[in-house]
Image: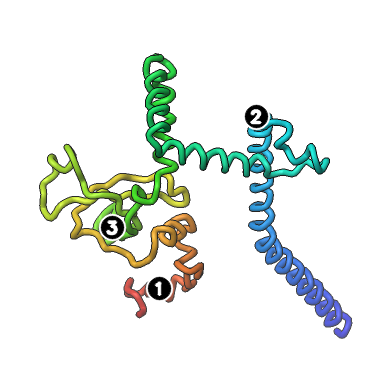
Amino acid sequence: MNRRFYDNHVVRRRRSAFAWLRGSFLTGLVVIAPIGLTLWLIWTVAGWVDSWVLPFVPIWLRPDQYVGLNIRGVGVILFLIFTVVVGWLAKGIIGRSLIHWGESLFHNLPVIRSVYKGLKQIAETVFAQSETSFDRACLVEYPRKGIWAIAFISKAAKGEVDAKIAREGGKTAVFLPTTPNPTSGFLLFVPKSDLIELEMSVEDAAKLVISAGLVYPDGQPAASRAIEEIRDPATGTNDS
């Protein structure tokens, strides 16, 4: 009997040690993985930009010619400086004139005209400034009454859409993102009275959507409750 007790004790200790190792490994993985992936992504993107930019940079401007080391990220810095200078020039009269002249050349070329127009629309959408971003986050009943979804308020309905919809308090364009990929979703035109604006920022609402409701504002995880605590199986109602 003592032998059996001793064997069971050894097995429990081994299981406890394995559980401790497994828990520590997973905890370390949760800490290391985001940091490592972020650093790897930055390193990879910097190398990719350098490979595209440095061939156009004169030799005398490359620091590796003076220190004898290939410093990654130089191309990124030069690209940022070049982009800022181009943007600054584009705001002036001469810059706008040059842009207009260049666009007129592209518009006269059948195939290039379509490619340039499409790429320009994509760039203007992706790199749009803050005044064209979503105004607020909100709640909207979707796909039916009683079910609420997070959406982002865009702008009031305008043009033909506004003219064809009955004007009962006005309609607002909202973007209803999908989870966990918020770049896809649905464009809805909803009466203002049917929207509930949220105090949380657009960024916090996006985190909530991407995490499928697991991360709330300020990085707080959602409180876990057992199903029995949420709904009483006998009555079908909430226990609170």
Q: Position of residue 184 (x, y in %)?
A: 41, 44
Q: Residue at x 47, y 73 (%)?
A: 225
In the image, which disc is placed on residue 56? 2
Instruction: Pick the residue in front: 36 or 226.
Output: 36
Residue at the extreme bottom of the image, as rendered:
2
Query: Tag 1: residue type?
Result: Ile
Q: Residue at x 86, y 81 (%)?
A: 6
Q: Earlier in the sequence, mark 2 or mark 1?
A: 2
| Residue neighbourhood size for the residue with mark 1, other residues' Cα within 10 Å, grouped as few (<14), some (14–19), many (≥20) | few
Mark 1 falls on what kind of element? helix
Name the colour scheme. rainbow
| Residue neighbourhood size for the residue with mark 3, other residues' Cα within 10 Å, grouped as few (<14), some (14–19), many (≥20) | many
Q: Earlier in the sequence, mark 3 or mark 2?
A: 2
Query: Tag 2: residue type?
Result: Phe
Q: Quadrant of residue 28?
A: bottom right
In the image, which disc is placed on residue 230? 1
Mark 2 falls on what kind of element? helix
Instruction: Pick the residue in front: 2 or 120.
Output: 120
Above or below: residue 11 compared with residue 160 = below
| Residue neighbourhood size for the residue with mark 2, other residues' Cα within 10 Å, grouped as few (<14), some (14–19), many (≥20) | few
Q: Position of residue 69 (x, y in %)?
A: 81, 42
Return the residue at label 3.
140
Image quadrant occupied by the N terminus: bottom right
Q: Nearer the viewer, mark 3 or mark 2?
A: 2
Q: Earlier in the sequence, mark 3 or mark 1?
A: 3
